[in-house]
Image: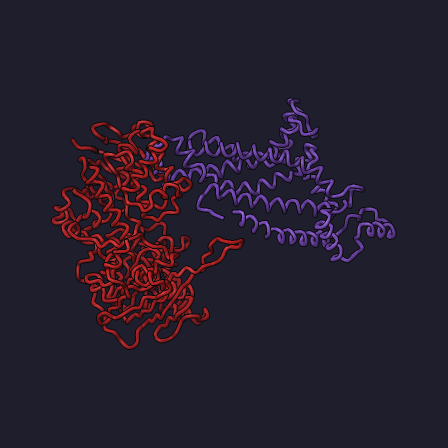
Amino acid sequence: MLAYSLRRLLVAIPTILLLIVACFFLMHFAPGGPFTSERPLPPAVLANIEARYGLDQPLWKQLWDYLYNIVVHFDFGPSFKFKDRDVNDIIAQGFPISLTYGSLSFLVATAVGVSLGIAAAIKHNSWIDYFAVGLGIAAQALPNFIMGPILILTFTLWLGWLPGGGWNGGQWQYLIMPVIALATSYMGSIARITRSSMLEVLNSNFIRTARAKGLPTRTVIWRHALKPTLLPVVSYLGPVFVYVLTGSVFVDIYFSTGGLGQAYVGSALSRDYAVLLGVTILYGALTVVVNLLTDLAYAWFDPKIRY
Amino acid sequence: MSLFSVKDLSVKFDTADGVVEAVKNISFDINPGECLGIVGESGSGKSQTFMAAMGLLPPAGRATGSALLNGEEILNLPINKLNQIRGDDVGMIFQDPLTALTPHLRIGQQMREVLQVHEGMQGAAARARCLDWLDRVRIPEAKRRLDQYPHELSGGMRQRVMIAMSMLCNPKLLIADEPTTALDVTVQADILDLMVRLQKDEGTAIALITHDMGVVARMCDRIQVMRLGEFVEAGDTREIFQAPKHDYTRTLLEAMPRIDAGDAPKALANVEEPMLKVDDVKVHFPIHVSGGLFGHKVPLKAVDGVSFDIRKGETLGVVGESGCGKSTLARAVLQLIEPSAGNVSWLGHPIVGLRRAELNKYRKDLQIVFQDPLASLDPRMTISASIAEPLKTYRPDLTERERKEMVAEMMERVGLKANMINRYPHELSGGQNQRVGIARAMINKPKLIICDEAVSALDVSIQAQIVALLRELQQEFGLSMIFISHDLSVVRAISNRIMVLYLGRIVELGDGEVVCSEPVHPYTKSLISAVPIPDPDVERSRTRLKLPGELPSPMDPKAALRFLPSRLSAGETDYVPKLSEVAPDHFVAEHDSLDVIMAKA
């Protein structure tokens, strides 16, 4: 397993390098640059600024300098848009916020989704099942940009229970709505996957054996059926984890949480090459690590899988 | 008093098409210590009868009537009451041991929970009881098995574990639902022996649900023959085999091929120019094994130097147990997978390594029928479209109308009704789909057909029909045929010559009748002696040749020399046993004497 993990991480290095190079060129080929604006700058000023950020150099040289600084100094460069802030600062500020509400959303979505799915499968074709399926579909149809306004309207404007936005160091009142907004649709998908997986497992031969042995129903479910049920759920959870960890632009905008999502989309719109690349690399690295963790988790769920 | 008594049991299923009655008012008794056989083909309701009694029906099923265990009603008991009976008074084992054990729990854990639930037994005492039972079902290295996961055990061993697990609480009744159907013949024979011993030593009554008359003949005191949810005949095993009263029983018995029938087709004379010549074909698959940072690959020798030829109009039967390379060999002959080495020539033309277009010229003459009839047809094509497809490829000159006529003709020839042309595979039965598979293979009048386990998934009566059809077609078109099956009785019934494979190599090749009645190689002998014969007197008086050891893995380098322990002990692990002609046209692989092989155990 150690050898396998090492091998995977070794393979990740060229993968991330390739990601950087591809993003780098894509961005530079997109029309416009960080300093194009409606009112063009005088050519001399523009040349000055570009020289300051090294944008007058040939592309390959820019790429080389960029990679060199990352590898040697772990420096992702200065932001082109925000003076006196560099990419490391921006990520250091936004990522903990995204990480906090993201991982909470992940936990909520997983816990509620899996429980709902299991309850529905065990009580197949009962009102619990219908309720869970209905809720799952409704939740799936409510992406966070719909949930955001609904929550704010209800809990802030109408009931007046919760603050309408802000972060405030991550106090619980400020966390509730972002977490629910982000978690809802994933919760719906997880519930549906869990339910159909559990139904399939309950129909399998080894469950028949377990029942034929005279085991009580709860033993059959928790000891025999749960692990195989969760296997497909885990493969769905991996990508979801990366996605929620890196935050959501909509959550950041609606609730003014100040997470990384807003910075990411903002940087793409304003061609802030450095921030955009920096966050992309972070996403890439996270994806690699989470995928590895997912694959290692399989081995725990299914002893046939050995690394 | 009878141990288990079923009265007027009916099972109904609520389906989208209305209520289906799977079991209709059946009654029977099982006495303590006896073995009752419930015999029938798929859909006869034989399994559902017992599932209903044990409360294991799917949610859509409803059971009515009565099932008394030791005089107490158990039908439709609440689940907590049933749970006291299941696994304690009644043990159950099922078909397909590969999926019957929970994959993520160790063997020991799965066994111990039975004792925990029924006897409150835990810890060392429970472990000792489990170990004792694993020993009693003759699992080698029982102690190590307790900590293994099911996938680390072979199918035969898993079925032994199932038996041990169901016997832990000394049940009075063991329900065995097709316990040996998915297993190789030698493994099947071992499991049946084991069950006979349990019945004798422990006094356990056995309800044996099966479709196999040979298994019934070996095991059962009495039988109940079931068809479409009803009993058609019941009685003493010997009486039913000798004088079946019901037509259906008679059909079942007649349809069952016997390995000792002595009416196999004779071998055809050797000719100068064979149709197909296979010369030292090898198929090696690289298998990834872990070790070091990147692991490495070792070859799995699925087929390891097989040579034979096929004469015009001849049927060559290929037999061997799972993993012996039968199917791989078939695919290599047809160039569906490229052989790693060796040559295949068709009518004198080598066909190995040809380009696709070149190969297609020969493909018209070389066809194959696969095992799973439903899975090998395109589910989105009507059966007539499937049958017509080879015509489109090889006879593009035909008009639509001519094609339709040929398809209709072929469908009629294989026994498919004309009104079925627009049906889809899922609307047909297994036997009908296999007829479609045969029609598709036959439509271009090929010269060689390979049947790869073509009748294995079918019920005996259907199997007999398909075999008869194949023989007729063979005579009509002068076909040559390679008939691959794990079922020696069927192979013998159709083959002129039989080739026995063991781990990718030929161990014996000769006239079908001779190989079956006077086998020379110890492996062939053990195979033949393990085949159950549907005749209780013959079957119970036979002695089995039981070779030491479990069915070996093709990855085990020593397994290839299982019949030459002398070479193995001399350290010649790469030695390849030579084939010698012991009689005209009868080839046997080099082997040590039986005593030397048996002494290894």
Q: What's the image's color scheme?
A: by chain
> Against A51, is A194 above or below?
above
**Seen from this angle, which residue lies furthest front?**
B570
Quadrant of the frame with the N terminus of chain B: top left
Q: Residue A252's spot in the image, x, y percent?
A: 68, 35
Q: B93 or A41: which is nearer to us?
A: B93
* Quadrant housing residue B415: bottom left
Q: Is residue B271 left or right of residue A281?
A: left
Q: Residue B300's spot in the image, x, y percent?
A: 41, 59
Q: A114 or B17: which is nearer to us?
A: A114
The colour one sees for chain B in the rendered image is: red
Q: Residue B78's spot in the image, x, y percent?
A: 32, 27
Can residue B595 be seen? yes
Q: B527 or B367: which is nearer to us?
A: B527
> Against B47, is A32 above or below?
below
Q: Residue B440's spot in the image, x, y percent?
A: 35, 61
The colour one sees for chain A in the rendered image is: purple
Q: Is residue A160 left or right of residue A306?
A: right
Can residue B245 be seen? no
At a point 11% along the width and 48% down the height, the residue shown is B243
* Quadrant housing residue A282: top right
**How many marks do you count on the picture?**
0
> Against B119, is B457 above or below?
below
Q: B218 or B428: which is nearer to us?
A: B218
At a point 26% along the width and 29% down the height, the residue shown is B74
